Amino acid sequence: MSRTGQIGLRAAGLALVAAAALSACSGGLQLQERQRGGVEGLFGLSRAEPVPPVATALPAVITPETPLLGARLVARDANATLAIAAVSGPVTTWRTGDGVNVNLTGPGVLQSTRGLGADLMASDVSATIAAVSSAAPGTYRRMHRYLGGDLRLSRDIYDCTLAAQGPEAIEVGGSPRRTLRFVERCEGGGARFVNTYWRDAARPVIWQSHQWVGPDVGMIEIQRLVE
Amino acid sequence: MRQAMAERRGTAAGGRGLRHALLGAAAAAALCAAAPAAAQEGRLGFGLGAYGMPGVIDMPTALAMPDGMIGLTADVLPGTARGTLAFQISPRLTGAFRYSRIERPGLGDVLFDRSFDIQYQLLSEGRYRPAVAIGLRDFIGTGAYSSEYIVASKHLAPQLRATGGIGWGRMATRGGFTNPLSIFGDGFRTRPGGFTGTGGRLELNRFFRGDAALFGGLEYQLNDRLRLLAEYSSDAYIVETAPGGSWKPRIPVNLGLSYAVSDRTTIDAHILQGATIGLRASISLDPNRPRGQGRGLVAPVPVGVRPAPAPEGGWPQAWVAMPEVRGLLRSVVVQQFQSEGLRLEGLELSGSRAVVRFSNLRHEAEARAFGRAARVLSAALPPSVEHFVLIGTTHGMAVSAVTLRRTDLELLEHAPDGAAQLLARASIEDAHGKPGVNGFYQEHPPEVPRFGWSITPYVVPSVFDPNAPLRVDVGLRAEGRFALASNMLLSGSVIQRLGGNVAGTPMGPPAPGYERVRTSLPLYSTNRPALERLTFDHFSRPGPDLFGRVTVGHLERMYGGVSAELLWKPVDSRLALGVEVNRVRKRSPDSFAGFGRYEVTTGHVSAYYDFGRGYLGQVDVGQYLAGDRGATLRLEREFASGWKLGAYATLTDMPFSAFGEGSFDKGITLTVPVSWFDGSPTRARNSMVLRSLTRDGGARLEVTNRLYPLVRELQSEGLTTSWGAVWQ
């Protein structure tokens, strides 16, 4: 090939590399989903693009009667509105539009989360549920499970004390609610957290709560906007 | 490449005596200090020294890194540069591979040296007991750093750690005294210099021989980030500081400062021997602690809970006879699977059972793929379907069948012990014989395109050429594939080199009497478009516990022909056996798809053993590309996150003298999962082999898609290891 031909080919090739590097092109049958991140992730250069979420069971139409939850992740300063995606016995799965699940059990105690990264994978909060539902302070244990990098579920046990802080009138979703405030202090395995529950004065329903998800996610603030 | 092992004697006997007294005191303090009650065990984390292993500056400490941790260190001083990869093989065993550039003024040349270290912690630090370790530095190879040592480390105060020890070899080049081990025999008094024959071998008759010397060090943690280091070094840097060198040692003490940039990265600066300055950077990676936190993973579909109780007489099954309903169900499952990064390969529906074959395109944790598939089925299928048989497939081979009951899914989704209980109730079996699983032909799913392509940039490094330690080629790769069936794939790739310096690599010397089976690789680096690979692959399940592969075509850059493999691996067995036979011809470097004249049959009988907790062993016995016969031993440690580190060695009947420098083929294998870095789920991995030298002995054919790694992930061990992610 002539020299100019070689240079032309090289220039064209480099242009292709630039294009390909920006979005390595592919189509049709693939053996695995295209990789993202990698070395760029090591240097903090890539941002994980959100994968299109699975079609959810969210209601197509939101009416004034549709049960809704408002949630805020304090550490990330992120707000979301959640609707009921499924009910399985006492556990209700609330879901955001961009693929985060918050599972609340009983009157509204956090059972687990999905889609937050270092999720609370599973938990045993039966004693908390019993204490808050019956509005009876006490001392008991909680268990949380988190997924480690070695794909093992940890088993973290916390000693907790629930104390009543008295009645408090709050406003949730524009409606005034008469509540009893409870504070749960837990400690175990080097971690320490404080959950607060605003339980309805008459029924076992938690209108507002601040609950600890885990060491990486931090606190989540939940409000029952529409029951 | 012989190292001048000149022995040095102390100048003044009195000076030496004082030095010994001080060291003795330090050692005694380190070993016997009755630590005050307030001192806590092991407050200081480990630090990586100049050699990339736990150490102070040049001298080692008796510490171990956390199990499984990887440390990367780059250390420079005038005339020397060292890059080390260290790995905590097990809680007490640390290994390292190092590549160094050493200027040797006495010989007027520059040595590019590869060395391996190993250290074993005999005792960990206790309240009164110091940590004690024994180590071999540069124990295979030409011996530029060759030393052995026994070392002890102890905290004297929560922020202060003292280390003391005794070294042989290079670590006895200052202040050496008669080997205390010579009480076991006069042979211990002298140390043979240089190396045997072509080098690269374990020189057993050198270990712990010759003079010994004491060394010691102190580490003081000043604050959160800063640590002060001081050591008495028994390494006199004889070769590097020969007349004509850029520096000369003045005092036997090294002083240093270590700054923790983050909890994973450290930068060190030190003054060596009062004469020169060195710099170091180290990064540690924990394969069990991903950097990303899984933020790219979208929450799963909740399990579809059927109304309870079930109607009398069971759920209606009339839908089974309606093809429109079955067609609709299939398309719903196909679409939902696709959102989850799964591909539906086959769906067999009956009134109470669904047998689903699928392949996992996204999730690095296989169990998560199974969990997501189960959730989708529970939400999509009619209530009468109670049993889900989930069959994981790879390359069209159905590997294992995991059977779950829908009732269990409904009950255990939110249970505190949901993952463990689901595993207890699941049954994992060989997929052979299950409905829809055929031995030799699996239909390509109609919803999936048959043709696929991609164009990606590539980077190929080539390391350890003595003249240019790092060579890199950059270019574009165009790949195409066509699926004749789910288990029959026609695929190929063409590369166009755009730049780089691999082509300039001189070929290594040939092995006399043998064909240049690998040393002629540089000839294949060309500026024209090159056919990298063009093959037809057929994967099969010939029988229970059996897996088969046949590959025909241009198998790799240098060879083409036929490759056939059979693997026996029962679903929950630790042992697997395989046989591979290849008949190949060398490709011509000058033509796009032509062949040369050299033809050879290579093949191996292999035994694989899973020791548990991620440790794998493999032995291959057979004939290699140059016609030499022998065996390869490979040991590997695999982490649930996808990291794999291993080492291998091959011994064949090719004489060491014919093989050339290095004597026999050995190397380190490393696989890095991309998902570890930013947490988003992906199955992409980068694998590399750090081979000591490219030679013609013990050379194997590079066939993609060897069966064992493909199959293993989907069987009991692979699923159980990742089962924590099943409900994720």
Image (tube, rainbow, N blue to C red):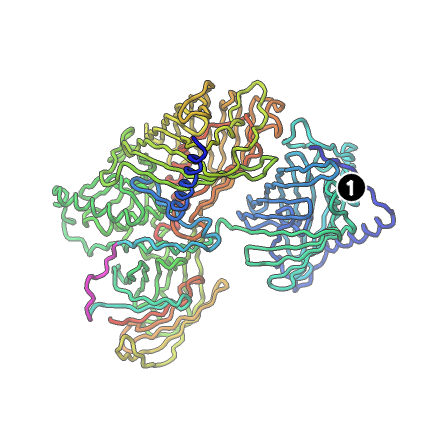
Identity of the residue drawn at 40% across and 75% down? A163
- Amino acid carrying label 1: it is Pro
| Chain letter behind tag 1 | B
Q: Position of residue B175 (x, y in %)?
A: 79, 45
Which of the pair B549/B411 is nearer the observer? B549
Q: Position of residue B184 (x, y in %)?
A: 76, 35
Q: Position of residue B433 (x, y in %)?
A: 28, 32
Identity of the residue drawn at 40% across and 44% down? A15
Residue B55 visible to the viewer: yes
Q: Position of residue B379 (x, y in %)?
A: 23, 52
Local crowd size for mark 1, using a 10 Å CA cut-off: few (<14), some (14–19), many (≥20)? some
Residue B365 visible to the viewer: no
Which of the pair A118/B411 is nearer the observer? A118
Overall secondary structure of the magenta stretch? loop
Whether residue B73 is situated above or below residue A112 in the rendered picture: above
Which of the pair A42/B427 is nearer the observer? A42
**Residue B60 included in the magenta stretch of the image:** no
Q: Which residue is mark 1?
A: B243
* Range of residues picked out in magenta: A55-64
Whether residue B148 is situated above or below residue A114 in the rendered picture: above
- Is residue B262 shown left or right of residue B80? left
- Is residue B254 shown left or right of residue B669? right
Q: Secondary structure at mark 1?
A: loop
Q: Quadrant of residue A176?
A: bottom left
Q: Quadrant of residue B552?
A: top left
Which of the pair B491/A10 is nearer the observer? A10
**Residue A58 included in the magenta stretch of the image:** yes
Q: Quadrant of residue B154?
A: bottom right
- Is residue B711 shown left or right of residue B289? left
- In the rendered view of the protein, which quadrant contains the N terminus of chain B? top right
